[in-house]
Image: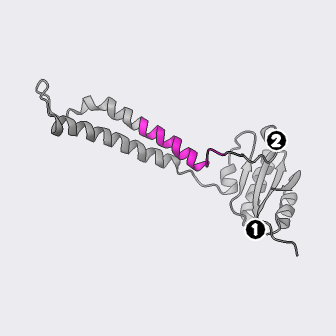
Amino acid sequence: MAKPVAGAVVGLFDDPHELLKAGEAALKRGYKNLDAYMPYPVHGINEAIGIKRSWIPWATLFAGITGGSLAFLFMSWTSAVDWPLNVGGKPFISWPAFVPITFECTVLFAGLTTMVALWSACRLPRHRPKILDLRLTDDRFALVVPTAGTGAEEERFLKETGAREVRRV
């Protein structure tokens, strides 16, 4: 019996449609944490390999609402409580004057949070990126199937689905 090795098996495909079919078959077969590499975006690959929607838009929305609310509250507090000034008989909380700063703070908080969330989601910065195959930036498509055992079953599966090359990483 071969010694179990934790790692992954990579199948290289010539066509994005073959990659989609292989990803769907792998998901139906029960493989988890699948990943795909390709030279350009392929429509439907996320659903084919079971990648769920990203949480980054929710972080952006929450940060934008927080930034806008904090800016509005700060301007309201300074205008009405901390240093109230009667300017031409206008109310202390004159919200139309607060709109530009509130908008700017909303965009600032949302943008910075999106950048940090994206780095976190992508686990950046990476000091040593793993290069699976240089042809993945040119004309090849790869499906990565994590293995818990020897990887022989995953290799056989990828060959059956039409992978041109199969290798362990």
Q: Is residue 135 visible?
A: yes
Task: Specify whether 94 is left or right of 153.
Answer: left
Give coordinates of residue 94: x percent, y percent.
20, 32
* Magenta stretch, main secondary structure class: helix
Give coordinates of residue 73: x percent, y percent.
26, 41
- Relative to 155, say whether 3 is above or below: below
Task: Specify whether 53 is left or right of 33.
Answer: left
- Kind of residue indicated by mark 2: Leu
Q: How many other residues sit within 10 Å of disc 1, few (<14), some (14-19) or many (≥20)? A: few
Q: Earlier in the sequence, mark 2 or mark 1?
A: 2
- In this picture the colour scheme is one colour
Q: Which residue is mark 1?
A: 148
Q: Which residue is mark 2?
A: 134
Point 42% across, 47% down: residue? 62
- Relative to 52, say whether 57 is above or below: above
Point 78% across, 39% down: residue? 137
Point 56% across, 50% down: residue? 54
